[in-house]
Image (cartoon, coloured by chain):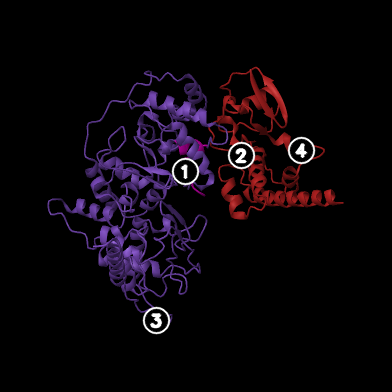
Amino acid sequence: MTWRGLLSGVLALGAFTGLGLFLYAQEQELAPIEASQLQRFDPAEIKKGAALAAIGNCGSCHTRPGGTTNAGGRALETPFGTIHSTNITPDLDTGIGRWSFDAFARAMRRGVDRAGRHLYPAFPYDHFTLVSDDHNRALYAFLMTRTPVNAPALENSLIFPLNQRFLIAGWKLLNFQEGAYRVDPSKGSDWNRGAYLVEGLGHCGACHTPRDSTGAERRSRHFEGAEIEGWVAYAINERSPAPVPWTVDSLHFYLRHGWQSEHGIARGPMAPVTTNLGDIADEDVRAIALYVADRMGSRPAVALRPVSATGTDAAGKSIFDSACASCHDGGRPLPFGGIDLRLSSAVHAPDPTNIVNVVMHGLPPAPGQRSPIMPSYGAVISDAQIVDLLSYMRSTFTDKPAWSGLEKLVAKQRARGNTLPLYSSDGNLSAPARPNERVTAW
Amino acid sequence: MVTLKVNGTTHELDVEPDTPLLYVLRNNLGLNAAKFGCGLGQCGACTVVVDGKAVLSCVVPVMLIANRAVTTVEGLGTMQNPGPMQRAFIEEQSAQCGYCIAGMMMRAQALLQARPDADDAEIRAHMEPNLCRCGTHMRILKAVRRAADLMRAEVKQSALESKS
């Protein structure tokens, strides 16, 4: 065979595959519902849907900062370019107002919109496919009864060829498996409930599982932790960096209240998650905690390092003693006192991104609620001083090896400036009042 | 010895490097606008501007400040000739007990320097960390909006003058 023959063969094969994929990628448009077709929903169904939407954390992605809830427009940075979340309010022209239940359910199960276009997997249908029909109905009832907002979708800026939607069908072929949750008969009903919520609607793995070069979650590294939006989602399997092992009880409390005395405060992209889980049925939070704690496995509690075994970095120590210790070594309990850093996952984690972010940006308060707060130091602390401080903290409060590449990371996070998404801390109106009280001797 | 640049003046000070900036401003430099509230960076009464950013001076040791430019309320204007931020707070009569006001002014100053056209939502979000126990928030917000107007008018005025 000549080179020319081979080349034309390859081209023909390529064209054939492309055509095949293109044909395979075709999905039918589903008929729109007309404005006159007023749908009625049972209030109990709507209420159930509200709780499910909280578990699904829909509003976190589908709301732009300062925007109306679920009206979309939030920019998500991915390695493949920027993608914008869409309007999922029932607006007829720019939202999902014309979507029938079948169209909604198809989007959840297969990642296809009403018009038949494939949705990018930034919308985690690889998880939502597990959601039951019954739950999809409740979610639909909830979303269709919100106030419609006119907010046209923003243009995505994805790299070629990924801006060609039919190619998503190829991605699905490789990475996506449609199907409802299958009960594990060897486990109890609570465990299965937790697994269904965590792996399905809760889509915890979307942040906590690392992705491969095509952007699909690596199943073999389930819950191993990953970078997301300039933050690190910690490992929530047996590699969890928490110095005190998580238990069902501590996880339950943390997810419910956004803080836990042996682990600290939810912040970064986790803060809205715990905010949402603060209002739903307690048994669902319990089930989620049960399943995740089981994934982490149990390991013996480690005795905390005595602080006297201090690191040697004098420059870092003097910064810590003068800027950090008054809260972090002040004896005031969480959530309003600073965490004893011997308990901090951020200081124990293999990747220091989160602690760098927190030093620079602090912990922004929850709007209009009492909440934990940490002042930001980015305006006053130099990169070199952050490196000194963090090296001291790492050697003093943990038995882990020093972080490598700290200088580079600090410079990188500094350069992100305002593009790093900051999240208000979880409001603690529901937190027990006692931790906020100071015991006064007089 | 620590070198500090405050309101345009450089000071050589014989203080411990771990002294909070607030103490040095008040005790060594006699700049008493910034207040000690909680001492934990939770209330905002001690807010000053460092290199254009609002900073809680009670939890910032001077060793971190080095050669950065610190601005306090004293740097915004004088009794005889108050700056736009100060004029706005006087004109709106925003102070009740007044303890939080210096911090409020400095936090607002940092915002308006960076974003002269900040809208109401932005102002509210930016002012969030500063607390007021008297409850004069509405007047404080009004004063910040007025300060923005005054600053814009000043910019316009000076542009006109430089033209003529």
Q: What color was chain B assigned in the picture? A: red
| Residue drawn at (41%, 54%) of the image | A80
Q: Which residues are magenta?
A: A356-375
| Residue drawn at (43%, 48%) of the image | A229
Q: Amino acid at mark 2?
A: Lys
Which residue position holds label 2? B53
Tally of numbered tags:
4
Which residue position holds label 3? A37
Identify the main secondary structure in magenta.
loop
Q: Which chain hosts label 3?
A: A
Give coordinates of residue B135: x percent, y percent. 61, 46
Q: Which chain is in purple here?
A: A
Q: Do the residues at discs 4 and 3 belong to one chain? A: no
Q: Which chain hosts label 2?
A: B
Q: Do the residues at discs 4 and 1 belong to one chain? A: no
Q: Do the residues at discs 3 and 1 belong to one chain? A: yes
Kindly report the distance in space between the C-alpha atoms of the residues bearing marks 4 and 2: 19 Å
Which residue position holds label 1? A371
Q: Residues within 10 Å of mark 4 (few under 14, many from 20)?
A: some
Which residue position holds label 4? B77
| Residue drawn at (39%, 70%) of the image | A144
Q: Amino acid at mark 1?
A: Ser
Closer to the chain start, of discs 3 and 1, is: 3
The question of residue A365 being in magenta is answered with yes
SS for tag 2? Answer: strand
Q: Which mark is residue A153?
A: none
